[in-house]
Amino acid sequence: MLLYKVRRHLVAFILGANTLSLLGCLFAYVAISYLLLAFSGEKALIAHDVFLYWLVVTASTVGYGDFSPTTDAGRLVTALFIIPAGLSLFAIGVGRVGLYLSDMIQKGKRGLRMTRASNHCVIIGWNGQRTMRLINLLLTKENGHQEKIVLCHNTAMDNPLPSKIEFVKVDGYTDDEEMKRAAIDQAARIIVDTQQDDITLATALFCHNQNPSSHIAVYFKDDDHAGLIRAYCPKVEVVPSVSIEMIARASVDPGSANLHQNLLDPAVDASQFSFVLKTDSEHSFSELITHFRDAYQAIPIAIRKLGTEEVDINPTDDVKLLQGDVIYYIADKRIQQL
């Protein structure tokens, strides 16, 4: 009964102890075990090349049997102290590690951990199935970008795709300390799509200030905010709502809605991609058309000159293209090099 009470109090103490206290208990356990074995005359067990090995396999109840106490006192010490106390420490240590790993997993699901990602894509905002569709499109291998995706949202929820993306829950999208957990300053691309345009605007301005070198794309329900973001951050790409234009085009040219949807989906046979020209030599658009068709079965449809935001759709054949210009084209898959 006394031994049971001592062990119960010992376990209660260890469970409530911090890491430093546990290390102290472990050190005391090893020291006391060594002294008790020494007083018991167990010289073979306290040898420097045997003691720790024997203590671990005995305390964990593995007990290989290659070493064992030979004196009555040694057997009593082993049975009444080394095994009970060691087993308690061993079990609690394993339990602590298990709880820590479980806590880390749960924190990751609830978005309470700091991401270690870099050159990743951050999606800010949650809009249910629309955001799920966005994530799945970005994860499509035909998209050509395989960087890690971090979803950032300001309300309590679990990671919707725990095996595919990381999730960070924040109190506010413009809080420096909170947004550091999403590694905004290390992101290659940032997508801002919240449920309120005012929040989207403030978040886009914040992200541009934190990481002006990243490519930031924002979506507004009301196009009135587009002019404001372009005035302060001309490099931020505003994604317009084109539903009205699509209705008008589909009514005049039947099938246009399906065509444009397919061009935006990298999972279909042919989609629209972009390519940054990296060669030092000058090329005409007609040369580009021939090379893309012959080498990749691709069709260039537009260009954007370096340093401008305007896209020239179906340019003339004699337009010259230089290093840094962007070519937009239709192909079965993304072209990785020219």
Image (cartoon, rainbow, N blue to C red):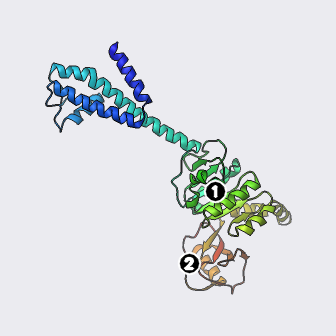
Kindly state the secondary structure of the residue where label 1 is placed. Answer: helix
For residue 255, side relative to residue 307 (left or right): right
Mark 1 is surrounded, within 10 Å at the Cα level, by few (under 14), some (14 to 19) or many (20 or more) other residues, namely some
Q: Residue at 39% across / 25% down in the picture? A: 11
For residue 258, side relative to residue 92 (left or right): right
For disc 2, the marked residue is 278
What percent of the width, then of the height, locates residue 122?
61, 56
What percent of the width, then of the height, locates residue 33?
24, 28
Observer able to see residue 168: yes
Nearest the eye: 117 or 297: 117
- Point out the image quarter for the C terminus: bottom right
Nearest the eye: 257 or 96: 96
Amino acid type, residue under disc 1 in the picture: Leu
Amino acid type, residue under disc 2 in the picture: Lys
Question: What mark, if any, has residue 310 been given in the picture?
Answer: none
For residue 272, side relative to residue 3 (left or right): right
Mark 2 is surrounded, within 10 Å at the Cα level, by few (under 14), some (14 to 19) or many (20 or more) other residues, namely few
For disc 1, the marked residue is 137
What percent of the width, then of the height, locates residue 296?
58, 73
- The image shows a total of numbered marks equal to 2
What percent of the width, then of the height, locates residue 132?
66, 50
Kindly state the secondary structure of the residue where label 2 is placed. Answer: loop
N-terminal label among 2 and 1: 1
Nearest the eye: 145 or 6: 6
Observer able to see residue 64: no
Nearest the eye: 251 or 109: 109
In the picture shown, does residue 142 fall above or below 310?
Answer: above
Quadrant housing residue 88: top left
Q: Residue at 61% across / 82% down in the picture? A: 322
Q: Residue at 61% across / 42% down in the picture? A: 158
Quadrant housing residue 12: top left
